[in-house]
Image: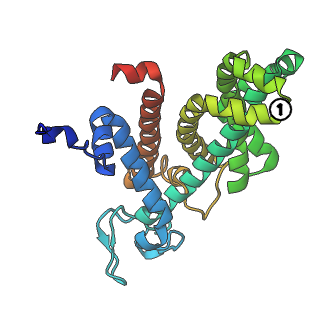
Amino acid sequence: MATSEIPSEEFILPKKKTILDGILRMLRKQPLGSAGFIVIIIMAFGALFADQVAPYDPEMENFEYMLSPPGTVDATTGQTFHFGTDSFGRDQLSRMIYGARTALLVGFTASFVGAFIGLVLGVGSAYFGGYVDLIFQRIMDIFMAFPLVIMALAIVSIFGTGLENVIIAITIPFIPRCARVVRSSALALRELPYIDAARSVGYSHSRIILRHMVPNVMAPFLIMLTAFVGQAILTEASLSYLGMGVQEPTAAWGLMLQGGAEEYAESAPWVPIWPGVAITLAVFGFNLFGDAVRDVMDPKLRSQT
């Protein structure tokens, strides 16, 4: 009995997608988000490998080369001050690289801690409802009545300056902002049948909140998280510029602005320009990446792309 030949095309397996295909797809669909992600990667690389990348010690003072313009060559080492030096003769490029480490440390720590606490509190408030939700929301209203920078300044004035206190001062205002957004999503989940089923089988409140509700509000949580990082970097720079944040000799972009924005704006413009550009690119990069995350995780926006 003759068997008919089956066309070989039917046995061709679909091409396996590689990481490169995913990157190209993201570049095509989210070009601005990809640009923001590249900025974040460059910042992270500089922060992680600052000891190897920076040409000078960021705290090393060289009074022979105070306020040297970009391109000045150090006669002792033969190295070039690519971004010039500040009023203490410290290399601007090295301080910018180490400043990225400070910015990302404050940004990621304050954002992750504040957003995670807000996630748990927001879901818990929506789950219990009643007087618990009412009292919790009134407390959140009190915190949210103050602008972020004003609240951070008040906290720093109580606890004092320094890197750790700056992180605490930025973390606390993030908690009610994340809790409010997450609560609005969790309220819709509270009445769903699977939550009632979990209650009926005797699951504890903590298990229902952490295992059944929290995973289903991760989309707004991640969107808030990416937005918080840029806000934290900008707030840290603002506090340091006002003298209420990171203190000398730690390298921080806000401190670099404080030391040159007013006094050397005309005589040595490279002193305030470079940290200002770094702050702008960092915040802009995280905002672009956050918008891309929102577009990817929002079903309505995803269906339009």
Visible residue check, residue 151: no
| Quarter placement of the N terminus | top left
Name the residue rendered at 30%, 32% in the picture.
Answer: 29
- Name the spot of residue 305 as percent of width and height, x first: 33, 24
Q: Between residue 259 and residue 165, name the one nearer to us.
A: 165
> In the rendered view, how is the structure colored?
rainbow
**As rendered, which of 283 and 114 lies closer to the eye?**
114
Q: Nearer the viewer, residue 43 or 302?
A: 302
Q: How many marks?
A: 1
Q: Residues within 10 Å of mark 1 (few under 14, many from 20)?
A: few
In-image side of 110 versus 135 (left or right): left
User: Splitting the image into 4 quarters, where does residue 138 fall?
Assistant: top right
Residue 193, image x and y in percent?
71, 17
Looking at this rendering, what residue extends furthest in the bottom direction?
76
In the rendered image, the residue lying farthest to the right is 131
Query: Is residue 3 at all visible to an observer of this figure?
Result: yes
Query: Under tag 1, what secondary structure?
Result: loop
Name the residue located 35 percent from the left edge and 41 percent from the top edge: 34
- Judge whether 192 appears above or below 100 on screen: above
- Residue under circle 1? 203
Whether 74 is drawn above or below 66: the answer is below
Residue 241 rendering spot, x and y as whole percentages: 58, 47
What residue lies at 67% left-to-right and 28% top-to-bottom? Answer: 177
Q: Amino acid at mark 1?
A: Tyr
Q: Where is residue 228 shown, x and y percent of the image?
A: 58, 37
216 or 230, which lies in front?
216
